[in-house]
Amino acid sequence: MPLLHGHAPGMDLRRGDAPAPADAAGHPDAAHAQPEHHDAGGHGHGDHNHAAHGSADHSEGDHAHDNHGPGDHAHDNHGHGDHPDHGDHGDHGHDHDHPGGLRGLFASVLRPHSHDAADSVDAALESSEQGIRAVKISLVALGVTAAAQAVVVLLTGSVALLADTIHNFSDALTAVPLWIAFVLGRRPASRRYTYGYGRAEDLAGVFIVVMIALSAVVAGVESVRRLLDPQPVERVGVVIAAGLIGFAGNELVALYRIRVGRRIGSAALVADGLHARTDGFTSLAVVGGALGVLAGFPLADPVVGLVITVAILFVLRGAATDVYRRLMDAVEPELVDSAEASLRATPGVLDVDELRLRWIGHRIRAEVGLVVSSELALVQAHEIATQAHHRLLHDVPRLDDATVHVSPSGHEGDQHHAAIEHHRPARVDASGRSDRRRAGTGRS
């Protein structure tokens, strides 16, 4: 549930002004009255008579202080699900791209994109279910692939194929921490973990990146060993068939994991798909080496293995970069631009004072600061904040929730935040500009 701050001196709670109607610029259902909109204090806004009582009559979830100066504010615990007339938004089309996902060797394959605009809680649960299902299916597929290769190892005695088989078994086991992460991510937030457990997914991504690095080490060491000490391969045709089975199984799992990971916005699941793809490369190395042996080049096997090791390192770089950015709360600048454009298009918004986005697992959280007219009543400013929040939920894919803060216009600098400004740490960029205000919008 977001915490919407209506922060505007001069707002009169006792005025009988109705909230100014607002459309949603392309979302007809976003312009609606809220006669039954209840906050945490149990007060409805549409038919609530503020003149009937003072601030002492409000509960903690719904209060105003009439005697405050520039620090006047009201808190309204208001979530997207608090609108009884919203229901499910359905599927909204978007004409813009939402960049994301892993960048690296296969950038065109690794760009998450989703048009899901369902209710945030239901969407989060649904996406976690999809992630768990993807992990289960890929676990079974890789297990079957490795078992088939193990049978061929017993028949041929191929050391390279044995290493590939062990590697495929280890890849199947990497699905376990990811499975645990998806299950943890479905748990509700607690007083200790107030943002929930979605970050477990990013920690699983770190584990998967480590496994990709180990894949590169194993492939490289095995290739060098066989380059220094070539080993004869028996039943080359069978080894080639087993290598192709390993490649096909790993590539199918990789495509499936990456597709689901892109759809639900899970960097960890996409990274695990990349891990399966690197194992497919290892299987191809087995095939390449066997073909080289058939052609009379016994050193072809280790040489191809070294080439595949280099390819795995490129994939590792892309996966590690994306997981690192998730852990550092990085988002695509284009996503910030899209969110800012959506906020600025909200009627009544004079400026976007602050905008921060962060991934928590495969869901996004937003913190927004808006500037509105200081002449508005508090209920009118609250309505503008609600409409801005509503637009974000429609326009930002996989947005889980947003905290919207409203500040009044007509004040120089941060005069209306003077009481708290000195508590905020100032961060200075390379040009010496402070981001104390307007963080995330690209302005200081």
Image: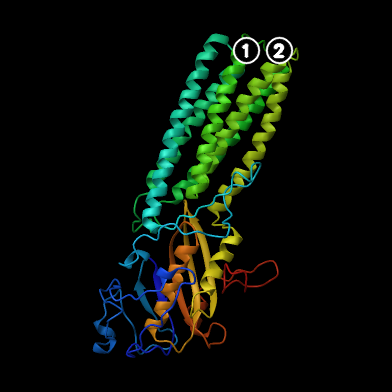
Upstream in sequence: badge 2 or badge 1: 1
Rendered location of residue 234, percent (x, y): 63, 8
Q: Quadrant of residue 329?
A: bottom right
**For residue 225, above or below residue 316:** above
Give the SS element for disc 2: helix
Labels 2 and 1 touching (C-beta < 8 A)? no
Amino acid type assigned to the residue bearing label 2 in the image: Leu
Residue at the (51%, 33%) spot, across then down? 253
Residue at the (27%, 87%) spot, across then down? 54
Residue at the (50%, 61%) spot, across then down? 396
Q: Quadrant of residue 212?
A: top right
**For residue 128, above or below residue 331:** above
Local packing at callout 2 (Cα closer than 10 Å; few below 14, some 14-19, many 20+) is some
In this figure, which residue is indicated by the disc labeled 2?
294
Left or right of 87? Residue 360 is right
Residue at the (58%, 30%) spot, across then down? 279
Between residue 9 and residue 82, name the one nearer to us: 82
Quarter the C terminus occupies: bottom right
Between residue 39 and residue 19, name the one nearer to us: 19
Q: Which mark is residue 237?
A: 1
**For residue 120, above or below residue 183:** below
Q: Quadrant of residue 31?
A: bottom left
Give the SS element for disc 1: helix
Rendered location of residue 35, percent (x, y): 29, 76
Tell me if residue 136 can be seen: yes
Rendered location of residue 52, percent (x, y): 24, 88
Left or right of 153? Residue 201 is left
Tell me if residue 229 can be seen: no
In the rendered picture of this protein, how many numbered marks are placed on residues? 2
Rendered location of residue 43, percent (x, y): 26, 77
Separation (CA) of disc 2 from disc 1: 9 Å
